[in-house]
Amino acid sequence: MKRIWDISPPVHAGSPVFPGDTPYQQQWAATLSPDCPVNVSTLTLSPHVGAHADAPLHYDPAGATAGSLDLEPYIGPCRVIYALKVGPLIEWHHIAHATQQLPPRVLVRTYARMPVDHWDPALSAYASDTVARLAALGVTLIGIDTASIDPADSKTLDSHQTIRRLNLRVLENLVLDDVPEGDYELIALPLKLMTADASPVRAILREL
């Protein structure tokens, strides 16, 4: 049996969110009792909580919604590349050691341990030139173990605008702590949320 790595952080009331975003909340609409045969909960959350796929609508007013995304970019061969503690931006020289014969999907690990229990305002993000160079090599999806492919305080979202221009897809908030650098099969399908700007995913890697 092929080994599976779960690269999704836990989602619960303590999950970190971008400042001002909607945290995870759960209430019980029904609970098991002599008069009720089931538990049923009501969830309130931003679609950017936990591992998630940004839809183009997130950064483009005319962009596609999560529910209309083609699923092909979210399943197939990918490469995990380490760029640990590189500072605010992942520059090309941080990942160049692993860019030969790239598969269509690239996930970059920046944390020694991904902070699943608190917000990190100093998160590492992609330099927009790095995104463009990956796209030029045939990459169609980029991922990262931080909350954003742009710095947390960015107002211009240069990397988001680069993926908009080049029609790339993106995964954020992945947990790559225990995944060796190398090639895998990625499976991280967004939900069919027809009006949403993003979707939670249960992201996994499977050995080839």
Image: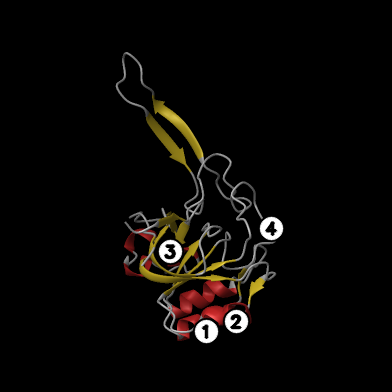
As measured in the structure, the alpha-carbon distance from the residue carrying label 4 to the one carrying label 1 is: 26 Å
**Is 15 situated above or below 184?**
above
Sooner in the amino-acid sequence: mark 3 or mark 4: 3
**Is 149 situated above or below 95?**
above
> Callout 4, which amino acid?
Pro
Looking at the image, which residue is at 51% across and 51% down? 50
Q: Which mark is residue 133?
A: 1
Q: Nearer the viewer, mark 2 or mark 4?
A: 2
**Is 118 situated above or below 154?**
above
- 156 left or right of 206 in image: right
Element type at mark 4 = loop
Q: Which residue is mark 4?
A: 121
The quadrant in which residue 128 appears is: bottom right
Sooner in the amino-acid sequence: mark 1 or mark 3: 3
Sooner in the amino-acid sequence: mark 3 or mark 2: 3
Q: Nearer the viewer, mark 2 or mark 1?
A: 2
Circle 1 packing at 10 Å, graded few (<14), some (14-19), many (20+), is: few
As measured in the structure, the alpha-carbon distance from the residue carrying label 2 to the one carrying label 4 is: 22 Å
Residue 17: image location, x then y, percent: 58, 50
Sooner in the amino-acid sequence: mark 2 or mark 1: 2
Q: Observer-nearest residue: 5 or 1? A: 1
Q: Are marks 2 and 1 in contact (CB under 8 Å)?
A: yes
Q: Which residue is mark 3?
A: 55
As measured in the structure, the alpha-carbon distance from the residue carrying label 2 to the one carrying label 1 is: 8 Å
Q: Which mark is residue 92?
A: 2
Circle 2 packing at 10 Å, graded few (<14), some (14-19), many (20+), is: some
Circle 4 packing at 10 Å, graded few (<14), some (14-19), many (20+), is: few
Looking at the image, which residue is at 29% across and 21% down? 37
**Is 92 situated above or below 108?**
below
Q: Nearer the viewer, mark 1 or mark 3?
A: 1
The quadrant in which residue 184 appears is: bottom left
